[in-house]
Image: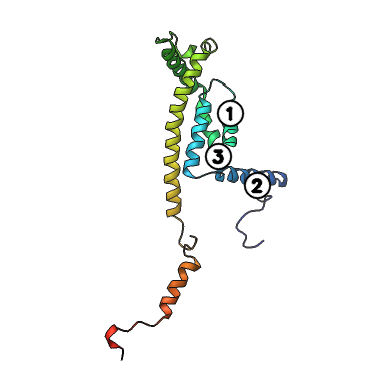
């Protein structure tokens, strides 16, 4: 294999069985990244993931995000990444704010508890948590989804701007080329007063 720019799996130190697994993983990642990947779809996917991360169902956020993205035909990878907002320190504060907001709207009073107590008192205040999830979850989903849309739009514009001219698809079609060809073949028309 003289002149081949890549190493063989054995030369790279990868066993042949692992090579197929790595190739399959790379293929799945490219497919997941490219499915439904227009800027609006990326924004909605992240919003769905963030909303699912705000639900009281701790431990199921990833599965909720993947299920919703599948049903709504959105990008599952971006929905999964959006659901990762629910890491424990952040999730404690999200749940605390949801419970407080829901309780305030329902009873016109704040709950006397700290952020550390939010998860332990969550079952007792599940109605307040559900109300707060609808409000705070939608707000966070809208903010994160809009940010993802703006980033994806900027990224797609920069990708288009950096495509080399020889790799860019040809825009003209035969219908557009035909009038140009005919006009270049026809002789120039003579001025009106010059005909005998």
Point out the frontmost of discs 2 and 1.
Answer: 1
Residue at image location 48% in from the left, 23% down from the top:
134
Between the C-alphas of marks 3 and 1, the distance is 13 Å
Between the C-alphas of marks 2 and 1, the distance is 28 Å
Instruction: Give SS at disc 1.
Output: helix
Residue at image location 42% in from the left, 54% down from the top:
161
Residue at image location 50% in from the left, 16% down from the top:
129
Label 3 sits on residue: 75
x and y, in percent, of residue 105 in the image: 42, 15
Report the residue that reaches farthest toward the left: 193
Label 2 sits on residue: 23
**Among numbered discs 2 and 1, the one appearing first in the sequence:** 2
Q: Residues within 10 Å of mark 1 (few under 14, many from 20)?
A: many
Residue at image location 53% in from the left, 30% down from the top:
83
Which mark, residue 83?
none
Label 1 sits on residue: 64
Q: Residues within 10 Å of mark 3 (few under 14, many from 20)?
A: many
């Amino acid at each position: 294999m003289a002149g081949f720019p890549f190493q063989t799996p054995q030369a790279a130190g990868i066993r042949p069985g692992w090579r197929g697994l790595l190739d399959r993983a790379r293929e799945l990642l490219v497919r997941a990244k490219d499915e439904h990947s227009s800027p609006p779809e990326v924004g909605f996917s992240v919003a769905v993931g963030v909303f699912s991360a705000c639900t009281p169902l701790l431990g199921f956020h990833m599965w909720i995000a993947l299920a919703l993205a599948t049903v709504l035909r959105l990008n599952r990878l971006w929905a999964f990444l959006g659901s990762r907002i629910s890491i424990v320190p952040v999730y404690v504060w999200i749940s605390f704010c949801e419970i407080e907001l829901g309780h305030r709207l329902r009873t016109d009073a704040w709950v006397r508890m700290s952020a550390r107590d939010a998860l332990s008192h969550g079952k007792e205040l599940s109605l307040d948590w559900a109300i707060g999830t609808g409000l705070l979850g939608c707000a966070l989903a809208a903010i994160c989804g809009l940010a993802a849309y703006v980033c994806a739009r900027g990224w797609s514009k920069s990708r288009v701007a950096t495509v080399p001219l020889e790799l860019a698809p040809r825009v003209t079609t035969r219908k557009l080329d035909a009038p140009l060809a005919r006009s270049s073949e026809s002789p120039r028309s003579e001025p009106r007063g010059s005909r005998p």
